[in-house]
Image: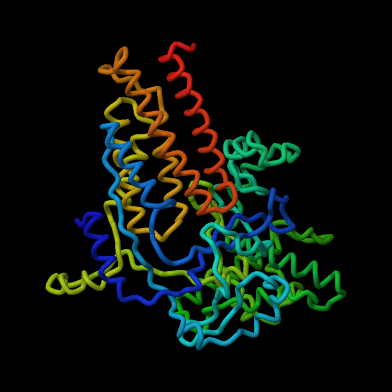
């Protein structure tokens, strides 16, 4: 199993010859609200965020890394964070970008892209994509857009708010910090829990909402298509129906049938209609010319949808924003099937990966949380220390996962419910001071990382850890004052 230092040296050696894209690499983050068929969230917009290429250091500079390493060494209860030399990332070269031409979609998105600093280009061999025309600082918000639709996964329908996509505990954090209006109220939907079992998959429900919106726009314009280009943007999303194998096309066709019955179930019964019989809906009422158009819509949703995540990056649903879907991702392989005799040669060509060490460290730390013994607490914090080191080497710069790891680490350091029988009297107080100091350092790092990864105040993770840091600082201040005889 390769360790993190080997991965670092392999990655650095391979990327020395890469050509840097001065404009930077686009990274997206979706913090979206629902469409008009659901209640609005506090922002109700999708956020695109940029992370310039260059040094792949975690949050701040080498000075802070050294300080963090020194504090961990002093504590004696956690593994030392491995410091990293700056690394670079492979990007689209300026030559490739200069070959691209402005896409015809620029006219369609003229209002959204006005003064933003990005444009849509058709790049040979790479397709359509968003290209920056100026430099952006890490964590800066490039563009805010209302999503076309956002839906929760079926398993989250009864536990997560359909307006802000937060659980009750996550909403309490924002309410306490003043980042969410306390006037927002949602009725008790316990009576709907049994009905949620009949909800279709999120792809069908997302397509259904789009169909309802389209029908409403057509009816409002007396049979004419919308004049604001709303459906044009959706219909021009990339569809893979023509390239899809026949068996996968049949799956799409099954999804179309599901959609037709889903839409039909939402209609009121006509006089004398048998409620036990559900006929498929006529898709012409929703502006479709044939089954092929519906197939393209279902395929486009599969290709272009974003994963809607919780503040801890757990998937809770899906969201669609046609413009942000043009932000090309950096696809990296995480598993390879190779021949043993070619191992040494292929290792120099493979992308960096910490599999399975990185995933197992985080999994083990989560299984130990909350710790029941002091040894479990130390083991969990040690694993999160190593996981953070691995994330700095294997994840892109300012990846939100780093903020989540640091937040989990800081919470464990601030935990005071696990008793250590060896720590009594002055020795125990000294150890408590060290842990509080360490929790403050890691917590501050988590807040900075969250602000870089999610922009603004760092979302729920940033707000929660900011409160944790303030609490630790207050407790540490009391301990120091008591030592000096002031209290």
The residue nearer to you, when weighing 334 against 286, is 334
Residue visible at 40% across and 52% down in the picture: 61
Residue visible at 50% across and 48% down in the picture: 450
Q: Quadrant of the N terminus?
A: bottom left
460 up-or-down from 150: above or below: above
299 up-or-down from 275: above or below: below
Q: Where is residue 119, by image quadrant? A: bottom right
The residue nearer to you, when weighing 44 against 130, is 130
Measured as percent of width and height from the top left, residue 455 is found at 57, 53
Q: What colour scheme governs how the chains and residues are painted in the rendered image of this protein?
A: rainbow
Measured as percent of width and height from the top left, residue 320 is found at 61, 64
Point out the residue furthest to the right here.
222
Residue visible at 73% across and 50% down in the picture: 39
Q: Is residue 448 left or right of residue 5?
A: right
The residue nearer to you, when weighing 325 against 402, is 402
Question: Can residue 341 be seen here?
Answer: yes
The residue nearer to you, when weighing 456 against 121, is 456
Point out the residue furthest to the left here.
341
Q: Is residue 305 left or right of residue 284?
A: left
Question: Can residue 254 be seen here?
Answer: no
Question: What number of labels is visible?
Answer: 0
Measured as percent of width and height from the top left, residue 193 is found at 62, 42
Q: Is residue 322 left or right of residue 83?
A: right
258 up-or-down from 310: above or below: below
Measured as percent of width and height from the top left, residue 115 is found at 68, 71
8 up-or-down from 247: above or below: above
């Amino acid at each position: 199993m390769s360790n993190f230092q080997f991965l670092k040296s392999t990655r650095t050696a391979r990327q020395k010859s890469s050509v840097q894209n001065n404009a930077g690499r686009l990274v997206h983050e979706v913090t979206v609200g629902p469409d008009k068929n659901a209640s609005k969230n506090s922002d109700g917009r999708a956020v695109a965020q940029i992370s310039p290429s260059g040094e792949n250091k975690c949050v701040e500079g080498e000075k802070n890394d050294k300080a963090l390493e020194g504090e961990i060494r002093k504590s004696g209860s956690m593994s030392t964070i491995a410091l990293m030399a700056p690394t670079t990332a492979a990007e689209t070269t300026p030559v490739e970008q200069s070959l691209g031409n402005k896409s015809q979609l620029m006219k369609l998105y003229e209002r959204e892209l006005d003064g933003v600093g990005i444009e849509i280009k058709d790049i040979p061999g790479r397709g359509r994509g968003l290209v920056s025309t100026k430099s952006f600082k890490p964590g800066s918000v490039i563009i805010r857009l209302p999503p076309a639709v956002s839906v929760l996964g079926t398993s989250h329908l009864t536990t997560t708010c359909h307006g802000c996509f937060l659980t009750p505990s996550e909403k309490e954090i924002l309410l306490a910090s003043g980042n969410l209006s306390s006037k927002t109220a949602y009725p008790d939907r316990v009576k709907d829990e049994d009905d949620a079992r009949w909800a279709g998959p999120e792809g069908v429900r997302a397509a259904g909402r789009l169909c309802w919106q389209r029908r409403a726009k057509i009816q409002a314009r007396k049979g004419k298509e919308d004049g604001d280009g709303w459906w044009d943007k959706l219909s021009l999303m990339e569809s893979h129906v023509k390239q899809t194998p026949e068996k996968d096309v049949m799956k799409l066709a099954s999804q179309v049938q599901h959609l037709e019955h889903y839409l039909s179930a939402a209609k009121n019964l006509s006089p004398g209609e048998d409620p036990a019989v559900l006929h498929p809906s006529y898709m012409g009422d929703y502006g479709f010319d044939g089954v092929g158009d519906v197939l393209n819509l279902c395929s486009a949703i599969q290709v272009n949808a974003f994963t809607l995540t919780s503040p801890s990056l757990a998937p809770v649903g899906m969201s669609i924003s046609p413009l942000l879907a043009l932000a090309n991702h950096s696809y990296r392989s995480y598993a390879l099937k190779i021949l043993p005799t070619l191992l040494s040669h292929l290792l120099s060509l493979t992308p960096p990966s910490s599999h399975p060490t990185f995933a197992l460290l985080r999994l083990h730390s989560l299984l130990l949380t909350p710790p029941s013994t002091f040894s479990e607490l130390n083991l969990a914090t040690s694993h999160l220390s190593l996981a953070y080191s691995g994330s700095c080497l294997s994840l892109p710069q300012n990846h939100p996962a780093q903020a989540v790891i640091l937040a989990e680490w800081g919470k464990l350091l601030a935990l005071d419910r696990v008793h250590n029988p060896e720590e009594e009297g002055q020795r125990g107080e000294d150890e408590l001071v060290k842990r509080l100091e360490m929790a403050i350092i890691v917590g501050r790092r988590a807040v900075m990382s969250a602000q870089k990864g999610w922009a603004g105040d760092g979302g729920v993770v940033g707000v929660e850890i900011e409160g944790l840091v303030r609490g630790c600082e207050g407790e540490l201040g009391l301990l120091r004052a008591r030592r000096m005889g002031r209290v």
